[in-house]
Image: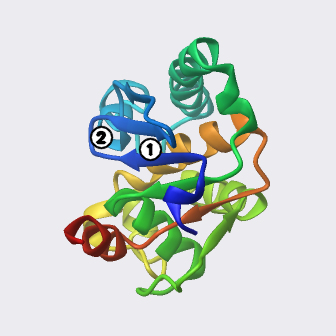
Amino acid sequence: MNPDAGGLTVIIDDEQVGISMTGGASWQLPLGPVTLLDRQLERADPPGPIQLTNALAAVHDHFDDIVNESPTVLSTPSVVVVGPHADALARVEIGADVIPAGYRLRRADAEEVFRTLVAEPAAERAFNPGLAGEHVETIIGTCCVVLAVMRRLDLADLAITAHDDDLARADR
């Protein structure tokens, strides 16, 4: 999916999430997978239900601020999620190291990956196909970011563009 065709681009970094809307509006959420791991998930292994609820709520609340400022976000025609953390989620969902072109993450699949990963301690989580070692601890925070956005926008799916594709597009 081409993020220039309209909609939102969500860039997931360690400690923040950048959101930009076609047409120029942009926002920063002051959290990311590492921040969620430290603050809401409290590095519990695995995190408990209250910690997971708090992490999802933190993203949802910050995203609500964007919706209040710009209600047109609710009717965005497309959402593209990019960055190494997004790549990690796509890879673990498909169980492979390569994200196919045009990949779309269905909400039902994101929910299932989330339910699976939150039940596993990091030592078990590390054996999930497609999950690179550097994302074993942060993948749950990544799931929280993506699911909170999908739930708030009531999305059936969204695009995840391979990080290498994003870098190539930026070089043009």
**Residue of label 2:** 34
- At numbered mark 2, what does the secondary structure look like: helix, strand or loop? helix
Where residue 125 appears, as percent x and y from the top left, is 45, 66
Residue in the image at 44% along x and 37% along y: 19
Camera-side residue of 121 and 149: 149
Camera-side residue of 43 and 90: 90
User: Is residue 45 rendered to the left or right of residue 51?
Assistant: left
Among the two numbered marks 2 and 1 on one chain, the one whose residue lies closer to the N terminus? 2
Residue in the image at 43% along x and 35% along y: 24
Q: Which image quarter holds the N terminus?
A: bottom right
The quarter of the picture where residue 80 lies is bottom right
Where residue 94 appears, as percent x and y from the top left, is 58, 80
The answer to whether mark 2 and mark 1 are in CB contact below 8 A is yes
Instruction: Residue at the far left: name it.
Output: 171
Where residue 137 appears, as percent x and y from the top left, is 34, 53
Is residue 97 placed above or below 80 in the rendered structure? below
Instruction: Residue at the far front: name it.
Output: 23
The kind of residue on which mark 2 rests is Val
The quarter of the picture where residue 84 lies is bottom left
The quarter of the picture where residue 71 lies is top right
Mark 1 neighbour class, 10 Å CA radius: few under 14, some 14 to 19, many 20 or more: many
**Residue of label 1:** 141
Camera-side residue of 122 and 58: 58
Residue in the image at 36% along x and 51% along y: 138
Q: Is residue 120 visible?
A: no
